[in-house]
Image (cartoon, rainbow, N blue to C red):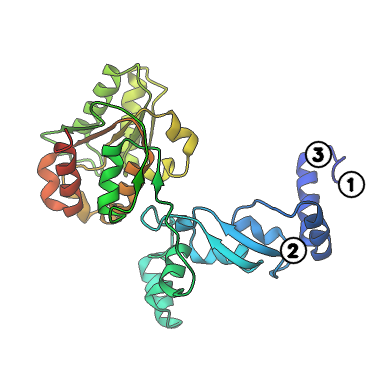
Amino acid sequence: MDIVYLKDKELKLKAFNQYLKDEEKLKLFMRVFPICATTCISAHKLGEPKKYFDMVIIDEASQCNTAISLVPIIRGENLMLVGDPQQLNPVVLLSERDNAILKKKYSAANEYDYISNSIYKTFLACDAVSDEILLSYHYRCHKKIIEFNNKKYYNGKLNIKSSINNEKPLVFIDVEDNNTDIKNTSPTEANKIVKFVEENRDKKIGIITPFVNQKKYIETLLQEKGINDVTCGTVHAFQGDEKEYGKREIPILAIELDGKEHMEDDVVRKRDEKKNAICKKHGFELIRIENSYARRYNYIKDILINYFEGSH
């Protein structure tokens, strides 16, 4: 009880963490609070690396890397992984060279590849006993938006129950003369986006791009126009942020430049899952802005453009 009456918040937090680190005190705590919520990395504060919980549930497991996930996993008798292996992989900063060296040194199979797999994908590849359950009912997106994902990623297994009614849920805006000398930046595309925002100030808009340089460029243009209520970010910035997604009536999907960037940036080569994450989250209307000439460089891009163009 002494912890409760501490006035200094930092001291209170430190004392509480020390309390939970003690195995016997943690067991006492769990008699009162049998359900604990924590991040994967903070789970190390819960006693020693032993089993304390009947069940460990990892949410968004497709975004958790295998190493950090072991911290909570080791503290449970049973495990439930909740996630979508078709969406974003975890962000891993380990270089491909170091990853290859470690795989060879420890004779690690591809199923345990640290860069390529989330904890969800690793279990999916290695566990032939446990059941995988698809949450097949979808309520969030307009049918024409989610139908692309349904066909491309879920083999038509989604049962779409959304009641959203929008005459043009998918709009494709072609950008010509998209060449630029600035890496991962397209001024032409950015200006098209800002113009669209200006013409739709009564709408709640979110802008998605995979490139930080393009994000900064768009934000600069928006600020110059005095527009401060439009969010611009990468897919990772939006993923999992249900509150932010819920605000956006129209997301602008600006995920291509001149068709050559796939040779320069690893984020582009692995964008298939990101397109699924983008489309699956949005409900009312999806605007895609890019250079249609660039479609020849990317098979998935070509499919998506054709889907947009044939949706009306």
Count of number-bearing discs: 3
Residue under label 1: 1
The type of residue carrying mark 2 is Gly
In this image, 155 relative to 301: left or right?
Answer: right
What is the x, y in percent for residue 280?
A: 35, 43
Q: Residue at x 31, y 28 (%)?
A: 165
In this image, 113 relative to 9: left or right?
Answer: left
Circles 2 and 1: CB atoms closer than 8 Å: no
Q: Residue at x 85, y 46 (%)?
A: 3
What is the x, y in percent for residue 274?
A: 33, 49
Separation of disc 2 and disc 1 at Cα?
19 Å
In this image, 187 relative to 130: left or right?
Answer: left
The type of residue carrying mark 3 is Asp
Separation of disc 3 and disc 2 at Cα?
24 Å
Crowd band around label 3 with a 10 angstrom C-alpha radius: few (<14), some (14–19), many (20+) = few
Separation of disc 3 and disc 1 at Cα?
15 Å
Residue under label 2: 47
Q: Secondary structure at mark 1?
A: loop
Quarter of the image where one finds residue 160: top left
Crowd band around label 2 with a 10 angstrom C-alpha radius: few (<14), some (14–19), many (20+) = many
Residue under label 3: 8
Of 69 and 142, the residue lying toward us: 142
Of 78 and 257, the residue lying toward us: 78
What is the x, y in percent for residue 128?
A: 44, 75
Which is more N-terminal, label 1 or label 3?
1
